[in-house]
Amino acid sequence: MSVDAIQLAQDLTPYATAAVTAYGTAVLARVESDAADATVSFGRRLLLRLTGRDAPDTQPTAEQDAIADSVSELAGAPDDADLVAMVRVQIRRLLAADPTLAAEIAGWARPAAAATVTVTTSGERSPAVHNNYGTIHTGDHS
C-alpha cells in the first residue's frame, strides 16, 4: 500500500499540534489520562510513535529527533503558524523516508474532528450561550 506522505502529514498535523497545545513540552513524557480528550490523546500517541518514544529500547532516527525538536519549539509558541508548518514538514519528511511507518499510521483510526460551534445572539440583552445548565435572567430586576 502506497501512502501519500504529504497528504498524511497534512491530515496528522492538527492532532500533533493539539497535543502540544494541551501538554506543552511534556507531551512526549506525559502519562495518558483517562480524562484526556480523544484528539489530544491521539495526537500524543502519534507524536510518541513519530519520535520513537513509544519503544524505549530503540534509538530514534535523525528524522524522529527533528520532530521532537520541532515539537519543543512549537510548545513555546503553539499559535505560531510557522512552527506548525515546521512540524508538518518534519512529519512529512519522516513519513516519506519510512513508508512502512506511514502505512501503519495511515491505518490508525482517528477520532472525529471536533465540531465547530457558532453561537449567535440578536437584540438588546440577548445572551450568547453555548451550553447552559441553569437559569439566565436578562431583566433589570433579576
Image (cartoon, grey):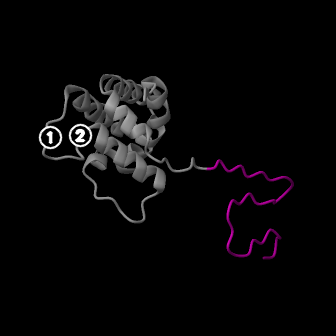
Q: Amino acid at mark 1?
A: Thr
Q: Is residue 7 above or below residue 28?
A: above
Task: Please tell me in which quadrant of the rendered image residue 89 appears.
Answer: top left
- Any mark on residue 58, and which? 1
Q: Are marks 1 and 2 in contact (CB under 8 Å)?
A: yes
Circle 1 residues within 10 Å: few <14, some 14–19, many ≥20? few
Identify the secondary structure beneath mark 1.
Answer: loop
> What percent of the width, then of the height, locates residue 111?
51, 50
Predominant SS of the magenta segment: loop
Q: In the rendered image, which residue does mark 2 sit on?
A: 52
Mark 2 or mark 1, which is nearer the start of the sequence?
A: 2
Between 111 and 40, the one nearer to me in the picture: 111
Identify the secondary structure beneath mark 2.
Answer: loop
Residue extent of the magenta highlight:
115-142
Circle 2 residues within 10 Å: few <14, some 14–19, many ≥20? many
Q: Is residue 92 above or below residue 26?
A: above
